[in-house]
Image: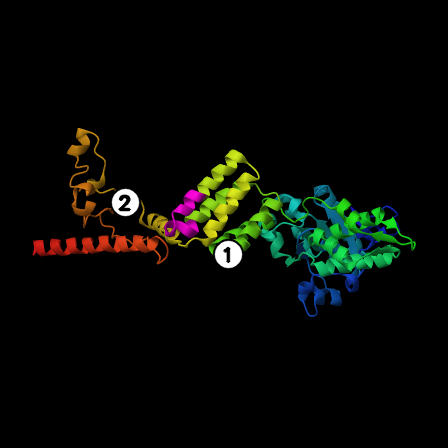
Amino acid sequence: MQQETDLFNNTGRANAPLAATMRPNDLSGFVGQEHILGPDRPLRRALDSGQLHSFILWGPPGVGKTTLAQISARASSAQFLQLSAVLAGVKDIREAVQQAHTAASQGQQTVLFVDEVHRFNKSQQDAFLPHVEEGTFIFIGATTENPSFELNSALLSRARVYKLRALDQGQLCTLMQRALSSAFPDVVIDDELLIQLAISADGDGRRALAQLDLAVDLAQLNSGGQRRIDEAVLSEISQASLRRFDKGGDQFYDQISALHKSVRGSDPNASLYWYARLLDGGCDPLYIARRVVRIASEDVGNADPRALELALNAWQVHERLGSPEGELALAQAIVYLSCAAKSNAVYKAYSAARHSVEQQGSLDVPNHLRNAPTPLMLEQGNSDGYRYAHDEPEGYAAGEDYWPDGMPAESFYQPVDRGLEIRIGQKLAQLKALDDEAEENKKRATT
């Protein structure tokens, strides 16, 4: 467990990471998160007044969660205790509680900061509840995962959740410019190259400062006695993929959602962008292939049945040939689906049919629709009165009832006026006219 004096003396350590040495002591030096720290925002008011409440900081790496927790403790003159859920256990929690009780007996408030709080299991999270409830300490948790899924509802009900955002390029450049002015006044870098570093940091302030630190080490002295970070230096420290991506986490599902919605929205260019982002982040192409097949059925459907065939073919190409041929085939399918006529009529019809089944229960199959493979089943009336459609005029048994006895017919499938479903709708309208005619004939026959 680290206490406040340990956490705020990093500047004097020769081997401390640059991100630690540049950690601000108050909000005047904090970069980003204006949506929660701007004037008159709830968290800003709490910090300015020194009246803290328990809260969860949720956001990607390197956006200032730990720094904000430390600033919060300083703003309220509280003792700062830190636990890492990766390493700590119930024993460490008990020790922190004891330290908080000791501080309280001396009239001092305690802030307990738990980094990676989602790593604690449910019972470990429960251990905080009575102490948060009693006010033994102010609880601040930090997590990169969605608290709705990873934290106990009881803990969430006792702490506000503040979502932090990735830093933009301007904010990352500000961080690096401060570091250059403070720690490396003899280092020179052109604005264009600083922006390149910001882009490669991908919203992560810690990564930006770490890359800058490495670039400074590699910088060469020029004739003026200065060290210059040039293109060669940036090329040396660049890595193949630095984009934020978490397989199975919110970023993963958000990007998959963006791909799906771009295809549904008939934007092939945005669809290709999100497809490339997913591949760049390390997503399994076969997962994307499965989603593309889903899109073909859900959002294109019978407006263009070729879409499903093309999606399945692209999946098969990737299974047989791998990368890069398979990735190109998937791109072809994605573009085709984006440009195809759209219909969710089958998707809606299937959902409505499932709902009907849930509501109606297990209704019996009418006798005329039952199978009759044995003489006994024939004696019981199975298949009695069934009309074989192929033997009927136009291959259609007009007026036949295919629903359970007593259940009225429902119209789940409503073709849209786009693509092939225009013709499907016309065909169904023609068949309905035949059914209506058969019903009229039946009424006249009975009267």
Number of numbered discs visible in the structure rendering? 2
Q: Position of residue 385 (x, y in %)?
A: 15, 41
Residue 309: in magenta span: yes
Report the mark closest to the observer, 1 or 2. Answer: 1
**Left or right of 53 in this view: 319:** left
Do the numbered discs 1 and 2 sit on residues whose CB atoms are within 8 Å? no
Q: Which element type, helix, strand or loop, lies under badge 2?
A: loop
> Label 1's element?
loop
Q: Main secondary structure of the magenta part?
A: helix
Residue 386 versus residue 194: which sits nearer the camera? 194
**Which residue is at the front of the view, 148 or 352?**
352
| Residue drawn 23% across the image and 35% down it | 371
Image coords of residue 254 (percent x, y): 56, 52
> Which tag, 1 or 2, sits closer to the chain's start?
1
Query: Quick check: is 355 in the magenta stretch?
Result: no
Colouring chosen for the image of the structure? rainbow
Question: Which quarter of the figure has residue 108?
Answer: bottom right
Mark 2 crowdedness (10 Å alpha carbons): few <14, some 14-19, many ≥20: few
Which amino acid is tagged 2? Leu
Q: Position of residue 166 (x, y in %)?
A: 67, 56
Q: CA distance from mark 1 to mark 2?
A: 44 Å
The residue that appears at 85% across and 59% down in the rendered structure is 181
Q: Residues within 10 Å of mark 1 (few under 14, many from 20)?
A: some
Q: Position of residue 280 (x, y in %)?
A: 62, 46
Which residue lies under the disc numbered 2? 363
Can I make out residue 230 in this image?
yes
Left or right, 252 with respect to 90, comes to: left
Q: What residue is shown with label 1? A: 267
Residue range in magenta is 298-310
Q: Amino acid at mark 1?
A: Asp
